[in-house]
Image (cartoon, rainbow, N blue to C red):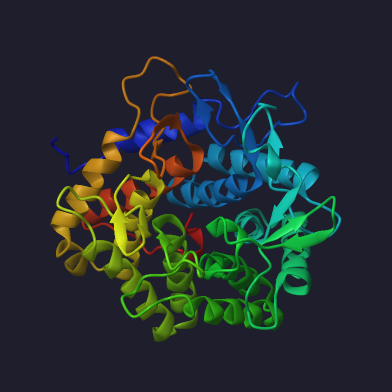
Amino acid sequence: MEIKKNLFNNIICALNWLKNSGIQNNDKKNHKFYGSVNAWFDVNLNKYSFVYSEINGYFLTLMSYLYQETKNPVFLDKGIKSANWLIKNALQKNGGYKCLFLIDKSSKHAYKKNLIYAFDNGIIINGLVNLYKITKKKYLLKAAEKCANWIITDCLKSNGGLRPVYEIDEKKFFESDKDWSTISGSYHSKVAIGLANLHSVTKKKKYLNNAIKITDYCLKFQNSSGRFISFPNKGGTNAHPHCYSAEGLWVMGVYLSKKKYIDSSRKALEWLLKNQNSKGFIPRLYKDNKPIYHERIDAIAQTLRLIYFCGNFNFIKIKKKKKKIFQLLKILLKNQMLKNKKIKINGGFVWGKLSNGEKKIHPNSWVTFFALQALIFKNEGDQNKLKKFDIFHLV
């Protein structure tokens, strides 16, 4: 597969999917979902499954990033619509945002509909603050602060860990090691990004101090090889939250000029690249001291972004990883749905494979967000035109 230096067509197709596919609900008659972003389009059922609040948080940041890059008001308008939906529909009295809103009532993810995840809320805070910085709309900042105060007051433990999941009906938190997203772990470093971004605007020390507290706690999950442990009781690692961990540490390291955090992020990236196999795949899972290479495309895109982050956007350093970048990019582009006649599909990036190797070919919102940002970095890097990147625009 030949990869053109200029990825303009791939980027444009992904942008068109974001704008035109219907992944954002734009039917004003459907007030319940208007402005929200769907998780994915199920090609087998020919419909959307549900709306994730977390994904809308990513969307706010992506739209802020694209607006700053292009000055196209379409992106800003789409971001504001998503933010308005979040605040009106997902924000709870306690300050947290409810996880999920069902479209397909039979979805296997229905159990999440009355849960609030601390991680999701950190993503949403960051998105709200990014939009506020551009629009100066005070209600966005107010909503971000309400959520941040809930995280600090209710979610944060004395040791810096976060209570991961809150049950709305039961009015209590729970934690389980059955899944990486239901335990207190290193991936919560991305919550610290939201708090730090909020501090950058309000200058309130409580947001920064607690962001540091969370980040320091996350370091405890990294072993000497650079690998972040996703399952503390079992010792295994999932590449997706491993990348989240590295992303949060990188942003906090740059924001605070803290070498300890930056070094940790680089070690995490080097672990991924060291374990990249001959075909270019990073380990989707690391279980029982063995890598499993069934690809998750979001983690592939995250790894590409990390190469640029940890190279501090230094073209010379990045160039040294040319072969590894080529292999990752080849995998990424093979999973973009191109030349498809359906507008709901064409241009989107698919999920990849589950842990058991089962393929999932639905065009996925957050996978496309991560992939699009990775492609923009790659394209600008090839032309030695990487711009100064706002660290809080990390999707």
| Residue 109: % across, % down | 63, 38
Residue 145 lies in what quarter of the image?
bottom right
Instruction: Identify the residue at horizontal 29%, vertical 57% (top origin).
Output: 291
| Residue 208: % across, % down | 63, 79
- Compare residues 31 and 301 and report the one nearer the observer: 301
- Residue 146 appears in the rendering: yes
- For residue 220, above or below residue 333: below
Residue 13 lies in what quarter of the image?
top left
Q: How many marks?
A: 0
Q: Could you tell whether 127 is left or right of 385 in the image?
A: right
- For residue 224, above or below residue 286: below
Instruction: Identify the residue at horizontal 49%, vertical 34% (top origin).
Output: 18
Residue 188 lies in what quarter of the image?
bottom right
- Residue 383 appears in the rendering: no
Instruction: Identify the residue at horizontal 32%, vertical 74% (top origin).
Output: 267
| Residue 25: % across, % down | 64, 29
- Compare residues 291 and 112 and report the one nearer the observer: 291
- For residue 113, above or below residue 105: below
Q: Could you tell whether 50 is left or right of 229 in the image?
A: right
Q: Could you tell whether 139 is left or right of 129 in the image?
A: right
| Residue 126: % across, % down | 60, 60
- For residue 341, above or below residue 136: above
Instruction: Identify the residue at horizontal 41%, vertical 41% (top origin).
Output: 354
- Compare residues 78 and 59 and report the one nearer the observer: 59
Placement of the N terminus among the 4 image quadrants: top left
